[in-house]
Amino acid sequence: MFIITGVKRKAGKKGVSLERGGDGGRELCHEDGALVQQAREKREAFEALYTKYLRKVYTYVYYRVGHAEDAEDITESVFLHALVHLDRYQDRGIPFSAWLLRIAHNLVANWHRSASRRRPVSLEAAEELHDQGLSPEEAVERAEEIRRLREALASLPEERQQVLILRYAEGMRHREIGQVMGKSAGAVKVLVHRSLISLHRRLSEKEEEER
C-alpha cells in the first residue's frame, strides 16, 4: 500500500490505478533538478516527483516481480528510500527517473534473493496492466501470452531481463537505459539485441515443450 503523505491513489475493483508520470529529456532533467531542490528545502514538494514517476517505477518493479502487492510494497520502498536519501542525488545530466530506477533495481534484487517470497503471476494482476476492453476469449488468450512471455523472461539472466523491461515496458531509449545500468548507449544496444535473441529462443523452446 502506498502511504507517502499527501499522495493519493485510486482503488477500483481490479486494484490500484496509478497515474502515468513524465519521462526523460534534457528539459525534464533540469525541471527535476529544480523539484529536487525544492523537496530538499520542503519535503512536501517531493509529492510532485512521486506523482510524476510513480507509474514508471511501479511498471518496472511489477514486470520484475510479477505480483501487484509486492510491486506496490517495493515501489513504496523506492520512494521512501529516495526521500530519505534525497541529498545523494546530483543533477549532472542523469535524470531523476534513472536514479529512482537504480534504487528500484537494487530493491528488486534483494527481493529475488529471498526465494520464499516469489509468487506466480495471477491473471487478475496481469489484467491490471493490460486491461484493454478485450472479450473474455481474447482476455484468456492475452493472459496466456503474458504468462509465456513472463516465464521466458524470468529464465534470462537478470541483466537481460532488466534491459528488455526498460526498453519495451518502459519505452526508454538506449542512452537513458545506459544511465540506469551504467553502460554506454552502444553497449545497451548490443545487449538489447542479444537479449531479444535469447528471449525468442526461450519462447520457441516453451512452445515446443507445450505442444
Image (cartoon, rainbow, N blue to C red):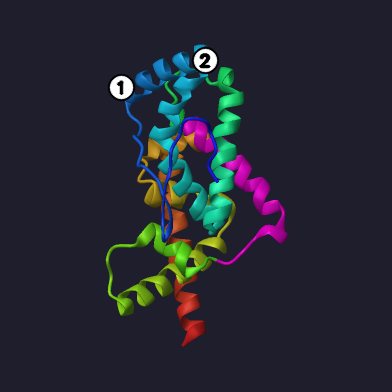
Q: Nearer the viewer, mark 1 or mark 2?
A: 2
- Given the image, on which type of amino acid does mark 2 rest? Arg
Q: Crowding at label 1, few (<14), some or many (≥20) Cα neighbours within 10 Å?
A: few
Depth order, front residue of 122/64:
122
Q: Is residue 183 above or below residue 140?
A: above
- Badge 2 is on which residue? 40
Kindly report the secondary structure that dominates the magenta region of the rendered protein.
helix
Residue extending furthest toward the top: 41
Rendered residue at 43%/38% (across/down): 8
Callout 2 secondary element: helix
The span picked out in magenta is 98-120
- Badge 1 is on which residue? 27
Distance, label 1 to label 2, CA atoms, is 20 Å
Earlier-in-chain disc, 1 versus 2: 1
In this rendering, position of residue 168 left or right of residue 153:
left
Callout 1 secondary element: helix
